[in-house]
Image (spheres, rainbow, N blue to C red):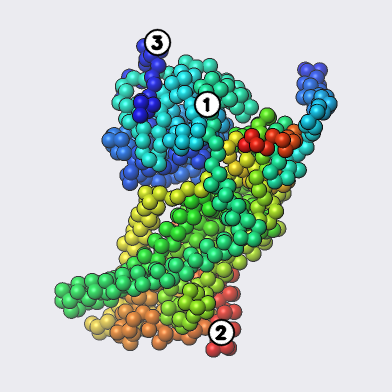
């Protein structure tokens, strides 16, 4: 492809701007320009996600190993339409470009990604970026698709118009990336000499962009009909909402039907490792600590990894395919009824995986009060950290009875009920907030519907690898230390040189101290210890229970499920999952809420409100179920 | 100074008032929310808060852009509009503030 070599203007005519090597490059582009795909392509797995200090904008940094230049740092800027400081994203982008962002090195060069399918609009961002005077390579993405759909552009002329090299690429296929390698290899670059609209407002940029696209013979491709044809069904008045329901139900059934055998297999392997390793150790307290304490605790959480990954895979497919934006459109009417708009639906839906990225995703909501209301209700959505305790209690207490043939059973129904409970609590709370302290006039809903795409294996795999890291790190640090502490506290104080009975140990005494408070919910003191430790993170309770029941001689030989059945009534068991559906037990979420709202006030209110709500709901559940069964 | 401001605002308001009389082909003025699904129009001006207006302009809602009403959401609102090769969903209350020139159906085949 000869088109893909960058066109460089005569470097002699303008003084070299930089004489040295390129060390830091920023990647900038409008939303939906394929920027993230390109970033992944250029950096591979070697990337780091963090936040810029003091602001809520995500910073992605990686090394450009994808083009053989691991020595060059690539900074991914948020997707923005313009550099005007209307949004926090744009302000951060401007600061990074000017080298004024603390902790971020000043860039030596810029990669500007533009979607060639909508070039005339996307060029509006080129004017303010080129006006910065940094060496810039313009990447026309998706040119392969544009050309097959009958579009064209004279990239040579475009380079002359813009005074910067232009390359045609396809981030999805990875073609044309040579141009980036060549661009980085240059030891001097030129500053663009072009006449740009100085006073930047949308109308003048637009006029300029239209002029440039006319002069470069840009012919927009025909828009694809396939997305519209799909929307005819997926946004149909009747089929649309119905299919949406089917998607959600299938999601839960899949997590149960496919995830369960995977988890069971994984459990068998983990148990085998525990037994084998235990046999190698001399009998005594070290063996007890490592096998009954640490391994039982950590592995009882680890077994849920397959199910959690399955859930993330499902949500990843929905998001990457473009369906999630349609779901927001379908939900807008319902969201309006509670005073929020359809945009709030996307973070709420992704909170099914984890509240933390979901709370960060609320940044797309322009209205501050709407955003705050969404942040406050997001932790009600059933995140994957609740799965371990749900799975454990349901498997232990709910019989596996088919409801709708073999496809939909009682266990999946209870699970779905818990998801609905969280959803209803979120809606109710949002409605309360929006009709009282966070009342606003109606806010505009502007949503771009992306074209449907087949999600790439690469980006799905990246999500899963990322998620496994987080989960394993959590298991290896928080859960490991909690189980260690619980084991230790359950073995002191020593009784005449030997270990105390569990009920007489320190942990037993703490548990019995708080028992009066939780007895009305149908919880015993062991569950109480689980509630205390799970304030750190929800899945910790399973680890704690694993350690406690594993340590207690009365239940040591039983599986965790059997031990729980031995120790609890169904009223308390269901009350426990109801409590988990509603309570705020995640320090990471509280920390993110604090960061995003910039005060401790909101996380504190959220914690008290959710815990109180959970307590009352669990109490009612226990009282009602104890009467029935 | 005062004089300048006054005359400026006067000029700003004039074009709307002095819109040339409708020529054959009936190019009538309306607002975006009035378009039926399948009909198109040409954007005249936006009458929205600065921030929203700016955002919409960057998404393609600029004067002289051609816009087509593509479909309504299952609940009847928002509506998906096609502009500049993009599909943008807007609620009725926002679309009501976007003034357009109605394009007769004869131009339909152009899309």
Label 2: chain letter: A
Q: Could you tell me residue A21's position as x and y percent?
A: 30, 25
* In this view, the mark in front (1 or 2): 1
Mark 1 vs mark 2: which is more N-terminal? 1
Q: Nearer the viewer, residue A445 or A471?
A: A445
Q: Are marks 1 and 3 on the same chain?
A: yes
Q: Is residue A93 left or right of residue A547?
A: right
Question: Within 10 angstroms of label 1, few (less than 14), some, or many (20 or more) residues?
Answer: many
**Relative image position of residue A573 (x, y in whole percent):** 48, 80
The quadrant of the image that shows the C terminus of chain A is bottom right
State how far apart marks 1 and 2 are (Cα).
69 Å
Q: Nearer the viewer, residue A540 or B97?
A: B97
**Quadrant location, the N terminus of chain A:** top left
**Contact check, label 3 and label 2, Cβ < 8 Å:** no
| Residue A427 occupies quadrant | bottom right
Tag 3 secondary structure: helix
List the residue tagged with mark 3: A13
Which residue does the numbered mark 1 point to in the structure image? A218
Gap in angstroms between the C-alphas marked 1 and 3: 28 Å
Quadrant of the image occupied by residue A293: bottom left
Residue A356 appears in view: no
Q: Is residue A329 left or right of residue A285?
A: right
In the rendering, at what x and y percent does residue A236 appear? 63, 56
Q: Residue furthest top?
A: A13
Which of A203/A367 is in front?
Answer: A203
Residue A625 image label = 2
């Amino acid at each position: 492809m000869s088109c893909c070599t960058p066109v460089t203007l005569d470097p002699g005519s303008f003084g070299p701007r930089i004489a040295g090597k390129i060390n830091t490059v920023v990647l900038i582009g409008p939303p939906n320009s394929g920027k993230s795909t390109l970033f992944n392509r250029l950096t591979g797995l070697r990337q780091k996600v963090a936040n810029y200090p003091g602001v809520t904008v995500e910073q992605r940094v990686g090394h450009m190993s994808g083009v053989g230049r691991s020595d060059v740092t690539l900074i991914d800027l948020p997707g923005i339409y313009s550099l005007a400081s209307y949004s926090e994203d744009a302000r951060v982008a401007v600061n990074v470009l000017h080298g004024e962002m603390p902790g971020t090195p000043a860039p030596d060069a810029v990669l500007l990604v533009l979607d060639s399918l909508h070039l005339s609009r996307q060029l509006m961002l080129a004017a303010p970026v080129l006006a910065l005077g940094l060496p810039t390579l313009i990447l026309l993405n998706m040119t392969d698709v544009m050309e097959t759909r009958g579009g064209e552009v004279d990239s040579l002329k475009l380079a002359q118009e813009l005074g910067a090299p232009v390359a045609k690429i396809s981030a999805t296929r990875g073609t044309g990336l040579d141009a980036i390698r060549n661009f980085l290899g240059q030891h001097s670059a030129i500053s663009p000499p072009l006449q740009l609209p100085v006073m930047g407002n949308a109308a003048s940029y637009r006029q300029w962009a239209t002029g440039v696209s006319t002069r470069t013979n840009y012919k927009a491709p025909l828009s694809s009909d396939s997305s519209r044809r799909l929307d005819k069904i997926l946004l149909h008045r009747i089929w649309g909402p119905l299919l949406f329901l089917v998607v959600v139900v299938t999601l839960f059934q899949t997590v149960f039907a496919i995830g369960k055998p995977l988890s069971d297999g994984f459990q068998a392997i983990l148990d085998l490792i525990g037994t084998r390793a235990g046999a190698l150790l001399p009998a005594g307290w070290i063996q007890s600590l490592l096998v009954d304490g640490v391994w039982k605790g950590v592995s009882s959480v680890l077994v849920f990894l397959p199910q959690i990954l399955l859930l993330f895979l499902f949500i990843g497919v929905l998001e990457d395919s473009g369906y999630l934006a349609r779901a927001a459109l379908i939900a807008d009417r319902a969201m309006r009824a509670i005073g929020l708009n359809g945009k709030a639906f996307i973070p709420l839906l992704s909170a099914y995986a984890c509240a933390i990225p979901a709370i960060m995703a609320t940044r797309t909501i322009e209205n501050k009060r709407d955003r705050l209301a969404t942040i406050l209700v997001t932790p009600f959505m059933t995140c994957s950290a609740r799965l371990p305790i749900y799975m454990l209690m349901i498997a232990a207490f709910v019989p596996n009875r088919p409801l709708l043939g073999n496809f939909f059973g009682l266990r999946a129904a209870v699970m779905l009920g818990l998801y609905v409970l969280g959803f209803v609590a979120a809606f109710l709370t949002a409605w309360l907030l929006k009709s009282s302290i966070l009342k606003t006039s109606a806010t505009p809903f502007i949503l771009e519907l992306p074209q449907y795409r087949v999600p790439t294996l690469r980006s799905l795999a990246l999500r899963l690898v990322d998620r496994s890291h987080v989960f394993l790190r959590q298991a290896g640090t928080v859960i490991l230390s909690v189980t260690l502490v619980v084991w230790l506290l359950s073995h002191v104080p020593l009784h005449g040189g030997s270990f105390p009975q569990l009920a007489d140990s320190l942990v037993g005494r703490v548990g019995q101290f708080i028992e009066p408070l939780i007895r009305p919910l149908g919880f015993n003191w062991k569950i109480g210890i689980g509630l205390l430790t799970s304030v750190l993170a929800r899945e910790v309770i399973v680890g704690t229970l694993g350690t406690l029941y594993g340590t207690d001689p009365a239940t040591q030989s039983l599986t965790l499920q059997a031990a729980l059945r031995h120790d609890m009534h169904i009223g308390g068991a269901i009350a426990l999952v109801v409590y988990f559906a509603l309570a705020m037990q995640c320090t990471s979420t509280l920390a993110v809420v604090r960061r995003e709202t910039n005060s401790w006030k909101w996380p504190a209110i959220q914690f008290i409100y959710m815990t109180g709500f959970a307590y009352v709901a669990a109490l009612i559940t226990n009282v009602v179920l104890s009467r029935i069964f | 100074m005062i004089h300048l401001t006054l005359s400026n605002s006067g000029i700003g308001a004039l074009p709307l008032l002095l819109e040339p009389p409708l020529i054959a082909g009936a190019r009538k003025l309306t607002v975006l929310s009035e378009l039926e699904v399948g009909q198109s129009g040409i954007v005249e001006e936006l009458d929205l808060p600065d921030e929203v207006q700016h955002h919409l302009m960057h998404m393609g809602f600029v004067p002289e852009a051609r816009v087509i009403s593509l479909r309504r959401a299952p609940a009847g609102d928002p509506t998906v509009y096609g502009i500049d090769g993009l599909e943008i969903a807007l609620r009725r209350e926002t679309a009501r503030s976007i003034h357009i020139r109605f394009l007769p159906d004869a131009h339909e085949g152009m899309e």
